[in-house]
Image (cartoon, rainbow, N blue to C red):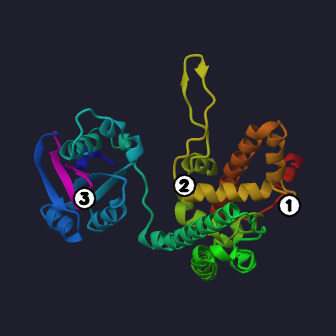
């Protein structure tokens, strides 16, 4: 992006009800500051003043409203930069922080060097809506887990240890084990657990159909042991386009699966992973990694790689093995997706033989 082809730099500090705006000209002089309603009509009414949208660069921060606002502005031809709010220390760590100043700082950073915003890529609306299906299922699972833990914990305080069983079978398996004087409190929870289980199964069917009909590229990813429809679909919807990454290895840092760095002089501290990027997808990949390294994971190069790390001993080595396999899994999935190749569980053997 050539900043010399831009006539106006607009910084927008997004709020829930209103957005604060600062407009700079190409020389960096403040032309106007104002506040507008955080609605589609309010945003369109403000940006109607610009006759040449392609000559306007709009800078906003990531947040609840940044996806739809960036889509509205790009559809009208404006250039939009969505800055990573976690990395804009110049704004959130200021000793004189207010909405008007934040908007001006966004505009000035965009004018000086857009890369300082650490721009993020918002997925398309269709991908966002499909990903919401996966997150709805995740929310239901979390609710069910909370209710199950409540029933088990309350029963323990009454002197009854409920039998072990899967979450799907919980409602039917424990109903007869609940103390009679606890039924008034536990029964509504058990009924809710049963209803949540039915809704989760319904969403599972929708997700399976979405993989088959809407995203056939997930089929190759699901050939990897431990990668099911949730992980494959979540991966495709989060990355959206495999060509966004020049190398498959770039996916690891993007998903926060690489170590942080704090190097100065002779000091280079070993740190934990960055945990940047999408939390939900990182959790799915870690779950898949735990299955690969678990008792039911079949023999493959991924499992052997993790076991070599875990064999160093101790809980720390096992945790590092899980993260390392999750990172390698993310890289492998991107390679399969971009190159449209089949999965070979023993690909390393052929590489060594060659």
Furthest-right residue in view? Answer: 353
Instruction: State the residue position of label 2.
Output: 279
Instruction: State the residue position of label 1.
Output: 298
Q: CA distance from mark 1 to mark 2?
A: 27 Å
Instruction: State the residue position of label 3.
Output: 54
Q: Judge by depth and name the residue closer to the eye, 142 or 283.
A: 142
Q: Judge by depth and name the residue closer to the eye, 165 or 215.
A: 165
Q: Position of residue 281 (x, y in %)?
A: 58, 59
The prevailing secondary structure element of the residues shown in magenta is: strand
Secondary structure, mark 1, is loop
* Segment tinted magenta in the rendering: 9-27
Q: Position of residue 224 (x, y in %)?
A: 75, 64
Q: CA distance from mark 3 to mark 2?
A: 34 Å
Q: Judge by depth and name the residue closer to the eye, 231 or 296.
A: 296
**Label 3 neighbour load within 10 Å: few <14, some 14-19, many 20+:** some
Q: Position of residue 170 (x, y in %)?
A: 71, 74
Q: Is residue 71 above or below residue 99?
A: below
């Amino acid at each position: 992006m050539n900043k010399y082809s831009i006539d106006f730099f607009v910084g927008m500090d997004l709020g829930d009800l209103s957005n604060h705006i600062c407009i700079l000209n190409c020389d960096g002089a403040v032309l106007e500051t104002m506040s507008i309603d955080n609605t589609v009509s309010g945003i369109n009414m403000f940006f109607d003043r610009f006759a040449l949208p392609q000559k306007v660069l709009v800078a906003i921060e990531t947040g609840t409203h940044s996806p739809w606002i960036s889509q509205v502005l790009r559809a009208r031809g404006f250039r939009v930069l969505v800055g990573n709010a976690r990395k804009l220390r110049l704004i959130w760590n200021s000793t004189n922080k207010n909405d008007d100043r934040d908007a001006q700082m966004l505009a000035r950073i965009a004018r000086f060097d857009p890369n300082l915003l650490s721009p993020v890529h918002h997925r398309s609306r269709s991908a966002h809506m499909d990903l919401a299906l996966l997150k709805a299922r995740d929310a239901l699972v979390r609710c069910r887990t909370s209710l199950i833990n409540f029933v088990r914990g309350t029963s323990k305080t009454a002197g009854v240890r409920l039998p072990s069983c899967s979450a799907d079978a919980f409602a039917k398996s424990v109903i007869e084990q609940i103390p009679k004087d606890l039924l008034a409190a536990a029964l509504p929870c058990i009924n809710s657990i049963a209803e949540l289980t039915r809704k989760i199964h319904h969403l599972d069917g929708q997700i399976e159909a979405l993989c088959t009909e809407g995203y056939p590229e997930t089929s190759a990813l699901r050939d990897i042991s431990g990668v099911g429809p949730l992980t494959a679909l979540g991966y495709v919807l989060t990355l959206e386009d495999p060509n966004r990454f020049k190398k498959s290895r770039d996916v690891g840092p993007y998903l926060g699966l690489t170590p942080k760095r704090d190097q100065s002089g002779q000091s280079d501290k070993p740190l934990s992973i960055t945990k940047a990027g999408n939390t939900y997808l990182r959790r799915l990949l870690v779950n898949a990694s735990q299955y690969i390294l678990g008792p039911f994971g079949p023999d493959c190069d991924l499992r052997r790689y993790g076991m070599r790390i875990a064999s160093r001993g101790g809980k720390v080595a096992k945790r590092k093995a899980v993260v390392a396999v999750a990172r390698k899994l993310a890289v492998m999935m991107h390679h399969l997706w971009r190159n449209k190749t089949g999965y070979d569980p023993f690909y390393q053997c052929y590489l060594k033989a060659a």
